Image (spheres, grey):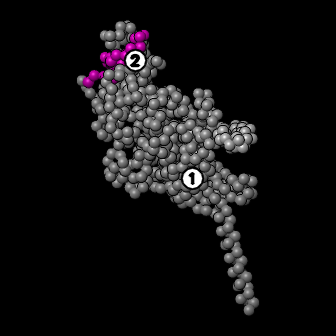
Amino acid sequence: MRRNIARTIVTSIAILAIVMSNSLMAAVRLPGFFNDNMILQRDIPAPLWGWADAGEEVTVEFAGQTKTVKTGADGKWMVKLDAMKASPEGRILKIGGKEIKNVVVGDIYICSGQSNMEWSTRGSLNAAEEAQNAKYPLIRLVTTPRLQIPTPQDDIKAQWQECSPQTVGNFSAVGYFFGRKLHKETEIPIGLINSSWGGSRIEPWIPPEGFMLVPELKQIADQVAASAPGSEAFKKGYQDYFNSLESWMPKAKAAVAEDKRPATPPSAPSSKGLPFGATGMYNGKVHALAPFGIRGAIWYQGEANGGEGVEYFHKMQALIGGWRRVWNQGDFPFYFVQLADFRGPNKNAAGGDGWAKHREAQRQSLTIPRTGMAVITDIGNARDIHPKNKQDVGLRLALWALANDYGMKDIVCSGPLYKGIKVEGNKIRVSFDHTGGGLMIGLRKNGLEPTKEAADGKLQHFAIAGADKQWHWADAKIDADGKTVLVSCEAVAEPVAVRYAFAQNPEGANLYNKEGLPASGFRTDNW
C-alpha cells in the first residue's frame, strides 16, 4: 500500500513538473518570423527579442553562446548575440525552452517596393529552367503578408524556407536573382525578406521618423505626427476637436428645437486620413522586422509615383533615412532600380516627357550615402509595365553590393553616370563616372544575352539647347579618350545644356560602357 502511495506521489510530482515546465515554455512568445530555416546576420551583435511575463528570465542559446535576460514590466525582452562569422552550418537556436532548427549565419536583405519587386520568379524569363536550377539551401526566403494599417504592427507571421525548385516560384524574382548572384560569388548564406506590394506608392513605406528628417516633407510629417496616439500633436488635435464639438453641441440643439437642420459636426482628426496612405505599409509589413539584423535593402518602386520629379528624391531621402533610423544599424547599403522604358516613344520630344523627371530624381538619390542604382532602360517593354527580364535587374543590383560591400573593387558596378560638362565652342563635352573599360555604342539587349557593341553605330537620344532653352536633337560622338562624349547641333551655335535619354521611353538610347551596362539618362540643366 505504502509503495503504491509513494509511486502515486512521485508520478504526481513528475506530472506537475512537466506541466510547470510546459507552462513556462508557453509563456515565452517569439516574433512570428522566428522559425525553422531562419538566418542571422553575421558580423554584428544579432538582436533577438520577444515577450513573456513581467520579470521572467529568458535564456537564449546559439553557437556556443548563452545569454540570459529578465523581461521588463511591459513584458518585452531582448538580447544581442555576440557578432558571429558567416556559417553554413544549420544549428539549433534555443529561446526560453523553444527550439528553432536549421539556423545559419550570413547576410540578410530586405526586398521591397511595388509590383516589379513583388513579381515572382514564376513570371520571369525562362521560368521553368530557373525553378529547376534553384537548388540553393543556403539561400533563405521569407515573404511578409499584406497588411496596411494606421498604427505600427509589433509582430509579423511569416515562414522562412530554403530556396528550392518548390519554393522559389512564388518568391520575388528580383530578390532571388540578386541573392543568387551574391551567394554564388561569395558562398555566404543569404537571407531575403520579401516585403513588397504591387501598385504601392512610396509614401506608405516611409516611417514617421523618415518624414520628419526631410524639411520639404514637413506637411506630411505634421499630419503623420497628428495621427500618432500619444504624441503631443495627436493630443492637441483631439483637444481642439473636443472644444469644437462642445461649441457645436448647443448650437445644434438650438437648431433642432427651431425645426432646423443643424450644421455638420466637426470631424475627428483620425477620420481625415493621411496623404497617399503614408506609413501604412511600413506599419504593417516593415516595422515588426526591426531591429532584426540585416546587411542592407534593395528597392524597386516608382511607377505609382511616376508623375513626380524632385519631390520623389525627397521621399527617397525620407524612406532611406527613416529605415536606417528605425533599424539603428548605421547607414546600411540601400540599392534601388531606376524605372524601365515603357509606352511608345515620342520622337518629337527632344526636351523629354513622361517619367524623365522621375528617373532624374532617382539618379539624384545617388547623393544619399551608401546607395546604388540599377539602370534598366534597355530591358523594358513598351507594352508591358512588368518586363520579364528580372535576371538582369537582380544582377545589376548585386554588382553594386559586390563592388561596395564585399571587397570586389575590380567589379564595374554601374553603367556611365553623368559627372559634368565643359563647353568647347559649339560643342559640349560630357564626362561620366563608371566608364569602366571605356564608353561604347551598344545594341539593344536580346533577352538574357550580354550587350553587344555596335561597331558602326551612332549615338542616339542626345539633345542640346542654348540659352533660349529650345531643345534640338544632337549629334553625339564618343571622343578618342573613350571616356567622354562630344555633343553638338548646327542649329545651336552657343550650347549651354545637354539631355540624354530624357524620355518616358528613350527608344534607341545606346550609350554603354565596355562592360555592357547602360548609361542613365540625365540632364545638365534645372529648367
- Asked whether residue 478 is drawn in magenta, I would say yes
- Asked whether residue 390 is drawn in magenta, I would say no
Query: Which residue corresponds to the image point at 32% horizontal and 37% vertical from the top-left?
Result: 383
**Horizontal placement of 246 versus 48: left or right?**
right
In the image, residue 180 above or below residue 56: above
Query: Which residue corresponds to the image point at 38% horizontal and 20% vertical from the top-left?
Result: 351
Q: Which element type, helix, strand or loop, lies under badge 1?
A: loop
Q: Amino acid at mark 1?
A: Ile
In the image, residue 490 above or below residue 291: above
Res. 470 image quadrant: top left
Q: Which element type, helix, strand or loop, lies under badge 2?
A: strand
In the image, residue 180 above or below residue 103: above
**Horizontal placement of 445 versus 253: left or right?**
left
Q: Nearer the viewer, residue 516 or 240?
A: 240
Query: Which residue corresponds to the image point at 37% horizontal and 16% vertical from the top-left?
Result: 471
Give, as a single range, the part of the protein colored magenta: 457-486
Task: Check disc 1 and report the residue beneath it.
Answer: 156
Q: Residue furthest front?
A: 259
Picture coordinates of residue 322, whole percent (x, y): 59, 37
The reply to whether the C-beta atoms of the residues labelled 2 and 1 are less than 8 Å apart is no
Q: Amino acid at mark 2?
A: Val
Q: Residues within 10 Å of mark 2 (few under 14, many from 20)?
A: many
**Horizontal placement of 500 versus 264: left or right?**
left
Q: Nearer the viewer, residue 10 or 172?
A: 172
Picture coordinates of residue 135, whole percent (x, y): 39, 54
Disc number placed over residue 104 in the picture, else none: none
Picture coordinates of residue 169, whole percent (x, y): 39, 52
Task: Check disc 2 and report the residue beneath it.
Answer: 498
Please tell me which of labels 2 and 1 falls first in the chain. 1
Q: Nearer the viewer, residue 225 or 165?
A: 225
Q: Is residue 274 in view from this perspective?
A: yes
Picture coordinates of residue 331, whole percent (x, y): 58, 36
